[in-house]
Image (spheres, rainbow, N blue to C red):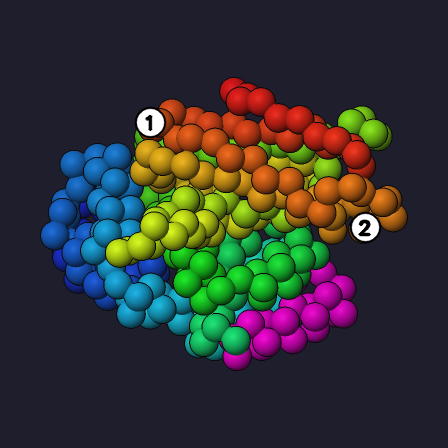
Amino acid sequence: MHLSSFNQLDQATAAAHLYTCCGSLQWVDELMQHFPFKSEQTLITQAEQIWYNHCTQTDWLEAFTHHPKIGDIDSLKTKFANTQHLASNEQASVTQAPDDVIAALAHANQTYEQQFGFIFIVCATGKTANEMLHLLTDRLHNTYNNELAIAMGEQHKITIIRLKKLLSNANWQCLKVSQITTHILDTTIGKPATNVTIKLQQKQTLANTSAINWATVAQGITNPDGRIADLLPPNRILPAGAYKMVFDTGAYFAANQTTGFYPEVEIQFTVFDNQHYHVPLLINPFGYSTYRGS
């Protein structure tokens, strides 16, 4: 569907389509105030602004309930029938995973839901079942507030993917890659470092105090090329300020049966503007280096 065709739909039908992209009534209602949309850029900009700046925790949690649990294939056929064509493709790698991995995902998600009160939300597109299991297990160690912020970002990634599927003939050249990207190279073996968990954290000063807090705003895992290309949703621009990326190098070396000196590597950097920031890492068991890439 082209955007022009979507704009010709009646309001109720258009709103119903948007609701399959993000299951928050508040988000849909506010977004429909801009209908018909002048351009794809307008749609994406308003979708993000409403999600991050106007919606509340209640709205975010409402949207989460419209996703099947990762690994829960049966729910795709029942509760989520209206988005089955979207979610089944997003979780394609899970349907092809071994039964023991699916069972582990289901068990870990049950633990996650008991701990946080909502299901594990991840943009599953392009991720293997093992990568999702690794992410799920790692995110169990987060605080509630950090995990809510991560899940918000993952939901918005999913929303954009579904908008692109809904308007498959639209012009999506306005979408830009994640503002923050990274690439890890293990210089000992001359290969990318895969399955490394990375947290993106924002420096915050606690209200009415001088105490500093590093709040996790995104979390991902490196792919077989040692990269995380979608740490942030497309077109999401971070406020200017201090940030850091925390690389779980200890777990990476342990998984590869190597003794590493650094359990974690933290790289602090400053975001000045809306430019793309590439923060690569070169590692070996006893040293590391970084630079601003392109």
Majority secondary structure of the magenta segment? helix
Res. 292 mark: none
**Mark 1, other Cα within 10 Å: few <14 / some 14–19 / many ≥20:** few
The residue that label 2 is drawn on is 254
Q: Is residue 22 visible?
A: yes
Q: Amino acid at mark 2?
A: Ala
x and y percentages locating residue 21 in the rendered image: 35, 56
Residue 175: image quadrant is top left
Q: Is residue 74 left or right of residue 188?
A: left
Q: Is residue 132 visible?
A: no
Q: Secondary structure at mark 2?
A: helix
Give the residue at x 43% y 26%.
Answer: 276
Q: Nearer the viewer, residue 229 or 85?
A: 229
Taking 165 as reference, is 109 left or right? right
Question: For residue 103: magenta?
Answer: yes
For disc 2, the neighbor class at 10 Å (few under 14, some 14 to 19, many from 20) is: few
- Where residue 227 appears, as percent x and y from the top left, is 62, 36
Q: CA distance from mark 1 to mark 2?
A: 37 Å
Asked whether, in this view, residue 285 is left or right of residue 153, the answer is right
Asked whether 53 falls inside the magenta stretch, the response is no
Q: Nearer the viewer, residue 39 or 121?
A: 121
In the image, the segment drawn in magenta is 95-114
Which residue matches tag 1? Answer: 273
**Nearer-the-camera pick, 230 or 145:** 145
Residue at 64% x, 40% y is 265
